Image: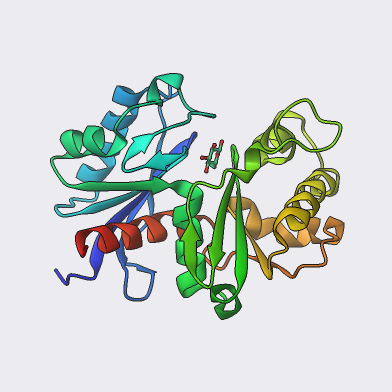
Amino acid sequence: MATTTILGIDVGASGTKGAIIDISNGKLLTERLRLPTPKSGKPNDMAETFAELVKLLEWKGPIGCGFPAIVKDGVAFSAANIHKDWIGTNISKLFSKATKQDVYVLNDADAAGLAEVSFGDPKASKGVTLVITIGSGLGSALFVDGKLVPNTEFGHLYLKGQKKVAEAYASSGARKREDLEYDEWGKRLNEFLLHTDRLLSPNHIILGGGISRKFNQFKDQLTSPTPILPAVFENRAGAIGAAMFAKQQVSK
Ligand code: BGC
């Protein structure tokens, strides 16, 4: 197989998704397979699901993994929507052992951002770009001229008047839990985006995650002066960026 071919896996709090990627252009070479993430959210259970997905895709070789936590040198430093046992766990070692392949791990939003900034809207590769992924949590990725500033975690900011962090109020998870209409939820997302806008003054904001497909249903609620672009790769970005990251690490 060509050396530009790598398996990318996007581990989420509710689904574990993977596809073999051509990292020279970000194209998926297989269908994107999805297994439900075990409800326990515990390391060994999630490692089992991860290994099962690798087996289903019949992959042997380096694997890139986007993971929903702060990740430094393969180790998890937070666990917002997964079991607290992850904190301090070496994700890279655990998944490498479970799959008998080398697994390279980064934050899931950082992975999605890498794909968007590299192969999405060309405007995103210049200046300061903020990528927000909307799912069970609110992920963030910050790029300066295409270079990632990892683990920003803006979804854990507190918005004015709120007792809980932004993702508990403005994620897709919050929308579902509280059964909010898109326009009602869009107003909440807008509060979050205005806040990050103030802090960072980005040149572009990209909104990712499955909900980017529904952009038209909430875009009228967004009043940020910064151009907001829906993600080009929607919920495929995480797997694509994870594969790109693995390639960068292997080539180091
Ligand atoms: C986590 C982030 C992650 C985001 C999206 C948040 O709860 O803290 O690390 O990127 O969810 O999965």
Rendered location of residue 135, percent (x, y): 59, 43
- Specify whether 59 is left or right of 12: left
Q: Is residue 81 above or below residue 198?
A: above
x 85%, y 44%: residue:
184
Way the structure is coloured: rainbow
Image quarter where the N terminus lies is bottom left
x 48%, y 28%: residue:
79
Rendered location of residue 229, percent (x, y): 67, 68
Inspect this view and state whether residue 30 appears: no
- Specify whether 210 is left or right of 189: left
x 40%, y 41%: residue:
71
Q: Quadrant of ligand 1?
A: top right
State which quadrant residue 208 falls in.
Answer: bottom right
- Specify whether 181 is left or right of 39: right
Rendered location of residue 14, percent (x, y): 49, 34
In front here: 213 or 43? 43
In front here: 202 or 206? 202
